[in-house]
Amino acid sequence: GAKVQSDPPRVPVSQLFPNNVYPVGEEVEYLNDNAYRTTNEEKRHLDRMNNDFLQEYRQGAEAHRQVRKWCHAHIKPGMSLTEIAEGIEDSTRALTGHWGLEEGDNIKGGVGFPTGLSINHIAAHYTPNAGNKWILGEKDVLKVDYGVHVNGRIVDSAFTLAWDSKYDNLLAAVKDATNTGIREAGIDVRVCDIGAAIQETMESYEVELDGKTYPVKAIRNLNGHDIIQHSIHGGKSVPIVKGGDQTKMEEGEIFAIETFGSTGRGYVNEDLECSHYAMRSDAPNVALRVQSARSLLNVIKKNFGTIPFCRRYLDRLGQEKYLLGLNNLVSSGIVEAYPPLVDTKGSYTAQFEHTILLRPTVKEVISRGDDY
Ligand SMILES: COc1ccc(Cn2nnc3c2[C@](C)(O)CC[C@@H]3OC(=O)NC(C)C)cc1
Ligand SMILES: [Co+2]
């Protein structure tokens, strides 16, 4: 009979959509061309050419939404960050059918990048390493930022959870700002104009915490980014404040539109133990002095390629005592380290993010769901 998703989600989405046609994301007409693109025969032809790519992307987006259902139902104060991360990752692997334990499997599909679980003043790039005992608290503001990929088509979408209503305005500011960014994005649009619009929306909010009123600030050194196959960062950034560069978005490009709001400085720097890594796509061919670095590099190439990973994924593959080798790969410029990004201690940061496809005919917010 008709397959339905289990709880926790373990039924591959390919079994829920048998004829391999997945739900279309939110389609938005481009603002600045009065429907020329929607009707133009050549643009519609170009769109039809991309069907395999679109189905892979929509499959990943459907998996992302179904994992979110588990998140909204099950992530609660009192849970450990490790339990939350593994819950998201196991569900992602089950829904895409890629458990990532055989060589090359994680390159075909599965977890798109490490499950970000950044709390309070930590804005991004935090996921627990082995042995982390951190328990989610009632007063925490948790950013859940995880990726799902199908054949290297990475869906990057994030949301913020809080259990104390005092943070409502902070979350509302960032959700509104991200939707402003999505609305302003489009073919031939300058990224600096998007950043200015995002900042204006974001900074029209303030939040009162324990008797003190804070203006919500856009975090000026965090950005959205373009996404290319098998790589979370193609090289273009989407600023979330005014004064960015004049680079234009182009037809066919894919962007992660993400904004971050803060009650702190509105600026992050690197802090805390690193968990996130990714092999550089332009990695130099240097001779490696450290034997363990050579064997570790092979494991990374065979299991991740340029898809970002974290230490827990190396543990899961049975790697041990790899830190010296990993640090050697980082200092050799072969692997990039992405330490946690933090605003001032005691501040609170929030994030919302969607992945959008700039299709020839229409802008598709591929990761849109009925939750955000
Ligand atoms: C290694 O695992 C990852 C996971 C995601 C990304 C995607 N990304 N790349 N840069 C960023 C991101 C995030 C996680 O989207 C948002 C934060 C950050 O934004 C930003 O501007 N940072 C500046 C300080 C350069 C990269 C690597
Ligand atoms: Co992201």
Image: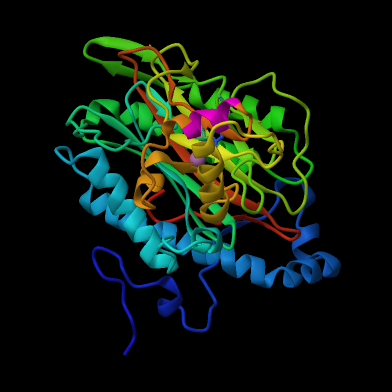
Residue 68, given in percent of the width and then of the height, sits at: 35, 54
Magenta segment, which residues? 325-331
User: Residue extending furthest right?
Assistant: 42
Q: Name the foreground residue: 168 vs 360.
A: 360
Question: Which color scheme does this rendered protein use?
Answer: rainbow
110 falls in the magenta region:
no
Identify which residue is drawn at 36% across, 42% down: 320
Judge whether residue 330 is colored magenta: yes
Question: Residue 63: x, y in percent?
Answer: 43, 62
108, above or below 84, in the image: below
Q: Please provide percent x and percent y for residue 65.
A: 40, 58
| Image-based side of 46 in relation to 227, left or right | right
Q: Residue furthest bottom?
A: 1
Above/below status of 79 relative to 357: above
Q: Is residue 177 visible?
A: no
Q: Nearer the viewer, residue 44 or 257?
A: 257
Closer to the camera in the image, 180 or 220? 220
Name the residue at 54% across, 77% down.
21
Q: Is residue 117 visible?
A: yes
At 33% from the left and 36% from the top, the residue drawn is 129
Q: How many marks?
A: 0
Give the quadrant of residue 244: top right
What is the quadrant of the N terminus in the image? bottom left
Whether 89 is drawn above or below 350: the answer is below
Residue nearest the observer in this picture, 308 or 142: 308
- Of helix, strand and loop, which mostly describes the magenta segment? helix
In the image, farthest residue toward the left: 78
- Residue depicted at 64% across the width and 33% down the height: 238
